[in-house]
């Protein structure tokens, strides 16, 4: 479990010292940290103050050292715990513990840049993002897990891609792959979604796919990352749908009643697939300690309140089939309420493909 801030008597905050090995890692990754600082991306997650890099100490600090954060394995540890009122549920610790033990997705079977590229492009969303995000864009993946999408998008020449997650074990897997195959445009940071360590309006694209619904407050998590998007930039969020998720929940109930053999009802867990990948999918879908479900209309309301206009949804709303040539960032109509509910009912009737996950994309107004 990563260290958390402790509060000295003077009200400042200091992480525990990282030790000799972590200091060596920080020095080796100085170029990455200095690049993020030079771009003006990083801020203190506690008070939003600018950070400076003390290379000798291997730490990021605010002026006067009031807040100080170590760097471990080349990853800035900028996680600051929530400071919520007493009585408000916080599932951060249990979700963090789950992913520390069960990183998702894993890197089994990925042993080169080409193998990651092939896997990513097999998924339509990743391929379209790579094709349609410009090569001079700054991209944040908020809740990157093991960083496969961040590393894939980081292969694009000229991009600045930052993968951020609360789980240090997952981030180490991401950075290890990045270092092994010299994906130099991808960088990784540990953070709390509710206290992101980035300057407002820092990114052209913010992606959070399959993440916000594992927090204590999905709408609040969206509100925390939405300000990071530049004017005319885009936000991409993937959530479990309130109807499309039901088939997975029914299978989960059956697994709890009759045992793991009921998981064979999930087509991803049948056949001769890679055991580690199937295990990771099983744990994420059927053993996760916390999730919530959300409607298309909920997200449209979030977009509007945060100053975003709807551009697209996967699956598409209404009777239009999703195309491999879809233009994700060009404004489309959200159609009528009945069209949106019809789309959600179709997700239910088709068995909740991809765990009932759907993706909403919005562009920030000026």
Image: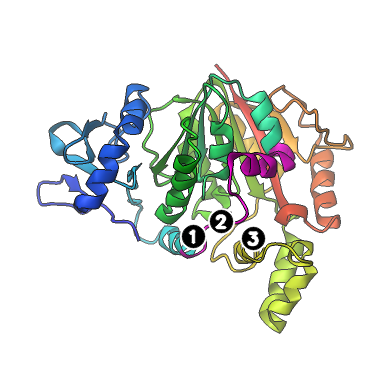
User: Is residue 106 rendered magenta in the image?
Assistant: yes
User: Is residue 76 rendered magenta in the image?
Assistant: no
Residue 147 screen position, x and y as percent: 52, 45
Q: Which residue lies furthest to the bottom in this view?
A: 258
In this rendering, would 268 be left or right of 202? right
Compare marks 1 and 2 and give the one earlier in the sequence.
Answer: 1
Separation of residues labelled 2 and 3 (CA atoms): 9 Å
- Which label sits on residue 99? 1
Q: In which quarter of the image is residue 205?
A: top right
Residue 70 visible: no
Separation of residues labelled 1 and 3 (CA atoms): 14 Å
SS type, badge 2: loop
- Which label sits on residue 63? none
Separation of residues labelled 1 and 2 (CA atoms): 7 Å
In this rendering, would 221 be left or right of 255? left
Q: Which of 258 and 108 is in front in this view?
A: 108
The part of the chain drawn in magenta is 101-125
């Amino acid at each position: 479990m990563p260290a958390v801030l402790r509060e000295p008597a003077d009200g400042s905050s200091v992480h525990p010292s990282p030790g000799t090995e972590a200091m060596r890692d920080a020095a080796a990754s100085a170029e990455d940290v200095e690049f993020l600082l030079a771009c003006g991306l990083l801020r203190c997650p506690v008070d939003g103050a600018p950070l400076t890099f003390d290379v000798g100490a291997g730490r990021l600090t605010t002026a006067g050292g009031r807040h100080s954060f170590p760097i471990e394995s080349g990853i800035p540890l900028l996680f600051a715990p929530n400071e919520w009122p007493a009585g408000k549920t916080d599932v951060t610790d249990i979700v963090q513990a789950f992913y520390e033990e069960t990183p998702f997705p894993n890197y089994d079977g990925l042993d080169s840049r080409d193998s990651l590229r092939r896997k990513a492009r097999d998924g339509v969303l990743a391929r379209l993002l790579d094709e349609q995000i410009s090569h001079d864009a700054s991209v944040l993946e908020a809740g990157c897990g093991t960083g496969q999408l961040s590393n894939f998008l980081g292969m694009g020449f000229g991009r600045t891609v930052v993968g951020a997650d609360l789980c240090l074990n997952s981030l180490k897997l991401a950075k290890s792959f990045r270092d092994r195959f010299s994906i130099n445009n991808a960088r990784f940071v540990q953070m709390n979604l509710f206290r992101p360590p980035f300057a407002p309006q820092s990114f052209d694209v913010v992606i959070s796919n399959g993440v916000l619904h594992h927090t204590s407050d999905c709408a609040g998590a969206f509100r925390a990352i939405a300000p990071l998007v530049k004017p005319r930039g885009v936000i991409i969020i993937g959530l479990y749908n309130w109807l499309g998720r039901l088939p997975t929940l029914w299978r989960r109930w059956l697994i709890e009643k009759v045992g793991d053999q009921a998981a064979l009802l999930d087509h991803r867990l049948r056949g001769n697939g890679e055991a580690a990948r199937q295990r990771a999918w099983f744990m994420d879908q059927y053993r996760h300690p916390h999730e919530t479900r959300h409607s298309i209309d909920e997200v449209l309301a979030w977009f509007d309140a945060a100053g975003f206009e709807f551009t697209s949804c996967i699956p598409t709303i209404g009777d239009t089939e999703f195309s491999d040539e879809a233009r994700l960032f060009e404004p489309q109509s959200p159609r009528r309420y009945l069209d949106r509910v019809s789309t959600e009912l179709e997700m239910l009737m088709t068995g909740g493909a991809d765990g009932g996950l759907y993706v909403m994309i919005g562009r920030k107004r000026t």
